[in-house]
Image: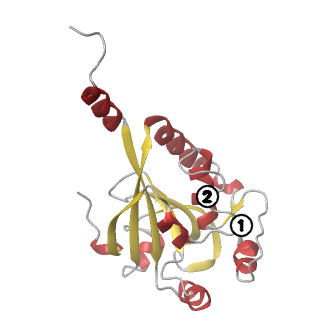
Amino acid sequence: MSIFPNTGEIAMQNESSQKEIYIVISQTGSIVSRIIRSVTGAVYNHASISLDPSLDTMYSFGRIHAYNPIWGGYVKESPNYGAFRRFRQAEVMVLAIKVNNAQYEGIKSKLEAMYDERGQYHYNYAGLFLALFHKPYRGKNHYTCSEFVRDVLEQFQVIEKDEFLGIVHPMNFMKLPDQKMVYRGRLSEYEHS
């Protein structure tokens, strides 16, 4: 009897130790999102990250209150409340990315710790405006939705530091080499398997 596991057992262990995170890029159809779409031409203009295939909890930088597009910050999002409940016809693309257990747990801790301290984080309005002129800008603890998702993926080495240089847009996440599209359509009709 060999003391070394066979390659099939190793592959099964590696596969079972992997989890998935989900990048959700969306177009709510709000006035602000329609303006951004008309300026950029991008089909999707918002990005969120979720640890759960149900997407019941997503994290991002966006509207703090569903009816106020001006007051933004670090938020939990869901199809069941907030802006996505208000804009039930939101179109989304859900991208799954495999991560190892350490990355998953690190990302989970980061998302929850930031939410506990969410008053310290602010929406990067200046960065959003200047991005229209291709000028990157970032204040301390200020994020757009895409900057936030990129920084989380970089911090836990899901992507390389130079994967997205300069200004990052939600549509850029579709170019990640290891992502797999698992859904495209209305968020209100999304069902996970």
The numbered mark at residue 163 is: 2
Residue 150 sits in which quadrant?
Answer: bottom right
In the rendered view, would you say 166 is above or below 161?
below
The numbered mark at residue 166 is: 1
Is residue 51 shown left or right of residue 156? Answer: left
Is residue 55 shown left or right of residue 45? Answer: left
In the rendered view, would you say 184 is above or below 60?
below
Identify the residue at horizontal 47%, vertical 58% (top origin).
177
Q: Nearer the viewer, residue 89 or 7?
A: 7
Q: Nearer the viewer, residue 59 or 71?
A: 59
Assign the N terminus to one quadrant of the image.
top left
Residue 180 rendering spot, x and y as whole percentages: 37, 60
Q: Nearer the viewer, residue 55 or 133?
A: 133
Name the amino acid type tagged 1: Gly
Residue 41 rendering spot, x and y as whole percentages: 55, 87
Mark 2: give few (<14), some (14-19) or many (20+) Cα within 10 Å: some
Mark-to-mark CA distance, 1 and 2: 10 Å
